[in-house]
Image (tube, rainbow, N blue to C red):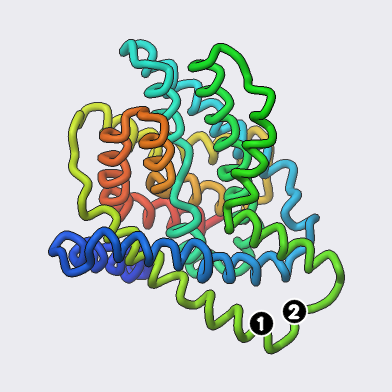
């Protein structure tokens, strides 16, 4: 347990370094935005393409793992929305709270952290979770909020959703990597060296960017924020473990990756959705901050447990 905790400390240390740089003003919000863009469009995309290019479609299409993760997310989504409605929250607020409970920071934090700590065999499960989060639940959120506001589904919504997905470089990088892998051609050494070099920048830059992006966040509505952080850091991995190990009997190694990914703190892109739809951006911002801080203690515990699987 102590060994796992010590291995995670450098990752969270980089987040802390970014937070300090942002909080002090040495690294302003504009710099954070450009660093995030570099990671999102270049470094992380190169890393994901490199991973996917060395996999086959069958590696990603683990039906049991997908069903287990979808079941756990679906149950938690309904639970969090139900509790929000009991507080008489608006539909937009209930939706964004449910989104906070299931969308972890798999891209910027999970990819480097889980692959280092759980090994290269964790790559297919991590990419599967990224695919589900970025395509399934982002589309679900958009469809429900559009229906709630307009009273109907816009005929043009499928096209808009498809365009939104295709504009996400992480999705595109994974799709192109799988497409390249399906050709049966290996990645040329020169291209592989380039991808490795660029992808190596993803881990430190992504973690630093996470910390810097937290610098301007404050905590309000502590009771709701604490509940959402508990839902994300405790209930999400617990439900995922139940679904993966008991209901769907997923391979233990794959189940461990699913559980570890479910234990990650709330992703930053949830705040972008909240801000765009004016759906409680303040509480989402606070939940990202609190869940990230608390995850310093909870993530090593979960990873230590799943390592035994």
For marks 2 and 1 on the same chain, the one whose residue lies earlier in the sequence: 2
User: Mark number for residue 187?
Assistant: 2
Q: Disc 2 and disc 1: Cα gap in Å? A: 6 Å
| Residue drawn 47% across the image and 41% down it | 103
Q: Residue furthest front?
A: 156
List the single residue furthest toward the left.
24
* Quarter containing the N terminus: bottom left
Q: Is residue 22 left or right of residue 165?
A: left
Given contact means CB atoms under 8 Å apart, are the residues at marks 2 and 1 in contact?
Answer: yes
Q: Position of residue 67 (x, y in %)?
A: 68, 36
Bin the neighbour count of mark 1 within 10 Å (Cα to Cα): few under 14, some 14-19, many 20 and up: some
Q: Is residue 50 left or right of residue 43?
A: right
- Comparing 68 with 22, the one in front is 22
Q: Position of residue 180 (x, y in %)?
A: 78, 68
The secondary element bearing badge 1 is classed as: helix
**Residue drawn at the location 56% of the way across and 43% of the way down:** 133
Looking at the figure, which quarter contains the C terminus? bottom right
From what the image shows, is residue 103 above or below residue 174?
above
The residue beneath circle 1 is: 192
Residue lying at 48% horizontally and 45% vertically, measured from the top left: 262
Q: Position of residue 26 (x, y in %)?
A: 17, 69
Check the image and report above or below for 78 versus 209. Answer: above
Q: For the view shown, which residue lies furthest in the right direction?
A: 184
The picture places residue 59, in percent across and down from the top left corner, at: 75, 57
């Amino acid at each position: 347990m102590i060994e796992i905790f010590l291995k995670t400390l450098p990752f969270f240390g980089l987040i802390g370094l970014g937070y300090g740089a942002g909080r002090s003003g040495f690294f302003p919000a504009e710099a954070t935005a450009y660093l995030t863009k570099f990671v999102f469009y270049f470094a992380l995309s190169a890393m994901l393409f490199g991973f996917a290019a060395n996999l086959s479609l069958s590696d990603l299409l683990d039906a049991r793992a997908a069903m287990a993760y979808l079941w756990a997310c679906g149950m938690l989504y309904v639970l969090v929305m139900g509790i929000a409605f009991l507080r008489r929250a608006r539909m937009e607020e209930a939706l964004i709270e449910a989104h906070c409970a299931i969308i972890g920071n798999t891209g910027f934090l999970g990819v480097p952290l889980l692959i280092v700590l759980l090994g290269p065999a964790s790559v297919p499960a991590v990419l599967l979770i990224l695919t589900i989060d970025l395509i399934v639940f982002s589309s679900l959120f958009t469809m429900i909020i559009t229906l709630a506001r307009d009273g109907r589904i816009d005929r043009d919504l499928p096209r808009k959703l498809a365009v939104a997905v295709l504009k996400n470089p992480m999705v595109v990088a994974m799709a192109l990597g799988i497409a390249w892998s399906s050709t049966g051609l290996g990645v040329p050494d020169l291209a592989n060296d380039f991808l490795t070099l660029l992808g190596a920048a993803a881990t430190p830059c992504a973690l630093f960017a996470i910390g810097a992006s937290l610098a301007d966040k404050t905590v309000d509505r502590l009771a709701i924020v604490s509940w959402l952080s508990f839902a994300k850091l405790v209930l999400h991995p617990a439900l995922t473990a139940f679904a993966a190990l008991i209901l769907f009997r997923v391979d233990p190694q794959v189940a461990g990756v699913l559980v570890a990914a479910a234990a990650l703190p709330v992703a930053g892109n949830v705040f972008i959705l909240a801000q765009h739809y004016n759906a409680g951006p303040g509480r989402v911002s606070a939940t990202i901050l609190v869940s990230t801080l608390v995850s310093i203690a909870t993530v090593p515990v979960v990873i230590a447990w799943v390592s035994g699987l």
